[in-house]
Image (tube, helix red, strand yellow):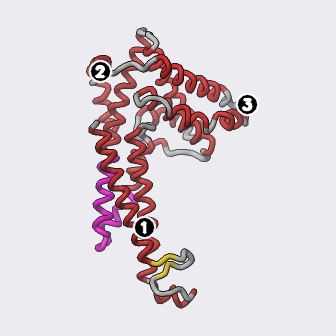
Amino acid sequence: MPRRIALLTLLCLPVFAAQASAHESAPGGKELKKAEAVLSKLRRLEATAAPDTPGAFEKAARKLYPGLFESVSKLRDGDLKTDLSTAVALYESALRATGADDCARELRDAYARLCHEAGGDRARLLRAKARLHAGRAEAALLYARGARDRVTLDALNLIRGERATDRALAEEALLELKALAAALSGGGRDGSASDTLPGRLEQLDRLLASLPRDRTAALLREARAAFRDGLYWRLKATPARALVVNVNSFDGAPPGTLPRLGLRTDDAGRAAHANLRAALKLIGRAEEALRR
């Protein structure tokens, strides 16, 4: 599915390159300097990740974060910011990463290849992904500074192809969110809608993990978080209604009150509804961002 999309993207690279060069406006000098400053810090951070210097990466990262997030947030939206933001976020995630990943879950060919090279090690994989995006940002900076060599032009074509893949994956994530909303709005009264939720959530999480840190992906992730919170409150409310007698017999809570939370069942229901309504609004905003 996404891999077929990636193949079509590569076949269309000359078209994307021509369209991009005709319509994209190059970032100004101040913008480039701010981007170069972020990239320089990422290079320094990567230099500390050598296996013969344990602890150096964590020590360097503590000095750079959270300032790097603030610096990259000030950049103008575009390919350069997308790749730098993604690299910044991935390096930060590598600090907390443990264990191994299943490389078969990677939807992007580039990510799957990096996963196999990292032996599935989660921290190494996240740093490898960060290096990939930092390298793409470097190519975009070189192009903006006037470089027109074959290596730079090939890198820019690849970036434009990746942006098309980003869009295809984001559209698929949007469809999963809409299907999730439909399943939840049905209430799962016959059990069939609820039975599909775990699979949909798993596929949605795979898609979101494959997306870069741009505005559309941020909205999609926020919608996923709102659904998660809505499901939490719905699950809290349901047992309270179904088991009110048994619950009261143990802790003496008033009828319709959620044990240990001090909330009434109706309050939990309203919280669930508010979160699900917020998710629908975020879906609409993400769809609008994709149209633009």
Question: How far, Cα to Cα, is label 2 from label 1?
Answer: 45 Å
Q: Which residue is mark 1?
A: 271
Q: Are the residues tagged 3 and 2 within 8 Å (C-beta)? A: no
User: What residue is at 33 percent from the left and 53 percent from the top?
Assistant: 281
Left or right: residue 107 compared with residue 135: left
> Alpha carbon of mark 3 to alpha carbon of mark 1: how far?
48 Å
For marks 3 and 2 on the same chain, the one whose residue lies earlier in the sequence? 2
Question: Hey, what amino acid is under mark 2?
Answer: His
Which of the numbered marks, if any, corresponds to residue 23? 2
Q: Earlier in the sequence, mark 3 or mark 1?
A: 3
Q: Dot 1, how many residues are within 10 Å of its Cα: few (below 14), some (14-19), or many (20+)?
A: some
How dense is the environment of label 3, judged by Cα within 10 Å: few (below 14), some, or many (20 and up)?
few
Residue 216 is inside the magenta segment: no
Say left or right for 69 vs 267: right
- Specify the amino acid type for callout 3: Thr
Q: Who's the residue at 29% across and 56% down the image?
A: 179
Residue 87 in the image, given as x and y percentages of width and height: 52, 33
Percent x, y for residue 92? 59, 39
The answer to whether residue 118 is seen in the rendering is no
Separation of disc 3 and disc 2 at Cα? Answer: 45 Å
According to the image, label 3 marks what residue?
53
Which of labels 3 and 2 is toward the front?
2
Q: Nearer the N terminus, badge 2 or badge 1?
A: 2
